[in-house]
Amino acid sequence: MSFSCFGDSIDRLIDRLKKLPGIGEKTATRLAFYMLNSSRKEAEELAKSIIDVKEKVSCCSVCFNFSDSDPCKICGNERRDDKTICVVEDPADFLAIEKTGKYKGRYHVLQGVLSPLDGISPQEIRVKELIERLRGGKVKEVIIATNPSVEGEATAIYLAKLIKPMGIEVTRIAYGIPVGGDIEYTDMDTLSRAMEGRRKL
Amino acid sequence: MPLYRTDAIVIRSMDFSESDKIVTFFTRDFGKLRGIAKGAKKSKKRFSNTLELFSYISLLFFQKENLGLARVNNCSIIKAHMEIYKDIEKMAYGSYFIELINELVGEREKNNEVFNLLVDSLSMVNGDKLGEEIARIFEIRLLSLVGYQPQLQGCLTCGHRLSNGEMFWFSSVKGGIVCNRCSHGQGNLSPISPGTLKILLLARDMDLRKIHRLIFSKQALMESKDAITNFIQYQMGKEPNSMKFLKKIHGLS
Ligand SMILES: [Zn+2]
Ligand SMILES: [Zn+2]
């Protein structure tokens, strides 16, 4: 704790906020003051929505996306196309692709990418579960939409090597996204084009 | 703010905000250094794929006098090492080298020879030399370049020199070999044959430009791994993540 000019409870809030990803001392202080100035109702709603996600949201046992139902709305929707599965790194990337409205198939959330430096091997992400899903024989194409980073590429190629021998087509989304870019922050047009222009792996 | 140019290998690349990246480089002239690349995630032109892990680049950066975060101005690629990420095993070996440098070389510690070793080792991984061989070569050379050179020429206790056919024992605690006679009563020793010791000495001393020709026998690979890889882990006080990763993928196949 750096200062104690504001009293313990504010300092505690700033310290908590600082632990959030991408939040430094300055931003944390600004957020804390914002909350202090906001109405009691607003503060309670924020607190409640945080507790709600912890209590109600868990993981879909089919696609491993965050969901408050199991299976999730997409896995449970009979109108979605069973023949394609789009593989993404995390729920944020799922959301970005789903928002384009162009994709009608199913998803699989890996919950990470392969990274030897971080000790994340195929066992640490949902690879085994993906392969299990593909054994059903319904799926004709797997679209790999991991990020265009070294780890994302390596994961895509690793999955392609596992899946292709099963007789399933594997494609990689085309990148209008710059290498080193991020799906989550890519605009919808670019992302739609990337889905349409996917190439075979 | 002065502007500098140096050769560099990207050893870590992390998203910092929606558009920026924080990148750790191992550079030829300044050792390990961290810099921020503004707009790296958005602009295709300025950095293209130069800031990705394992990239060998020519780096232009601004540096304030207080040696804080450098500001990446421009990069051009020297070699991208594209084959490394087509194969997670190659990626694991490349990561292992980076992890060892991260652990055993200090911040801003310039070491031209370690830099050349990393460049040549990544280049070998990118090619088709056996990963285990490159790893053993990298380990023994790095250890001697950063001052942890194990004693491999004679018994640490009695000075008995290497001779024909005689087995020795490697001790991580002592950082070298002991002869059969002096090994009694000591724990945690791994056997190491004279053939293995010979090839380790070659791997350590041979001209780096010719090192790709060095071939390890299966026995030499195993014995030197038991000795040297464990010695490094003993020095580090932990098992590197990429080593754990390698064990797991080898267990899968
Ligand atoms: Zn689901
Ligand atoms: Zn002795």
Image: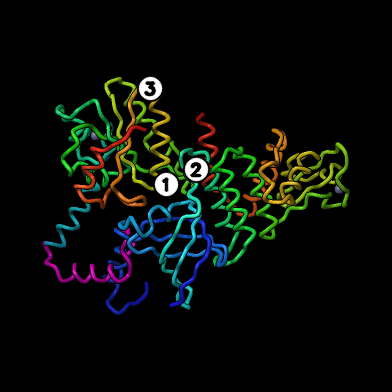
Badge 1, how many Cα within 10 Å: few under 14, some, many 20+?
many
Q: Chain of mark 2?
A: B
Label 2 CB-ligand 1 distance < 8 A = no
Q: Check if mark 2's residue and mark 3's residue have beta carbons within 8 Å.
A: no
Q: Is residue B240 magenta?
A: no
Distance from disc 1 to disc 3, alpha carbons, whole Å, reads 25 Å
Disc 3 is placed on an element classified as: helix
- Residue at the image position 52 percent from the left and 65 percent from the top: B6
**Type of the residue with mark 2:** Ile
Badge 3, how many Cα within 10 Å: few under 14, some, many 20+?
few
Location of the N terminus of chain B by quadrant is: bottom left
Nearer the observer, disc 2 or disc 3? 2
Judged left or right of residue B204, residue A186 is left
Disc 1 is placed on an element classified as: helix
Which residue is identified by label 2?
B84
Q: Check if mark 2's residue and mark 1's residue have beta carbons within 8 Å.
A: yes
Q: Chain of mark 3?
A: A
- Measuring from the top left, give residue B163's x and y in whole percent: 88, 42
Which residue is identified by label 1?
A150
Disc 2 is placed on an element classified as: helix
Could you tell which of marks 1 and 3 lies nearer the N-terminus? 1
**Type of the residue with mark 3:** Met
Q: Report the disc number at residue A166.
A: 3
- Residue at the image position 46 percent from the left and 73 percent from the top: B3
Q: Which residues are magenta?
A: A18-41
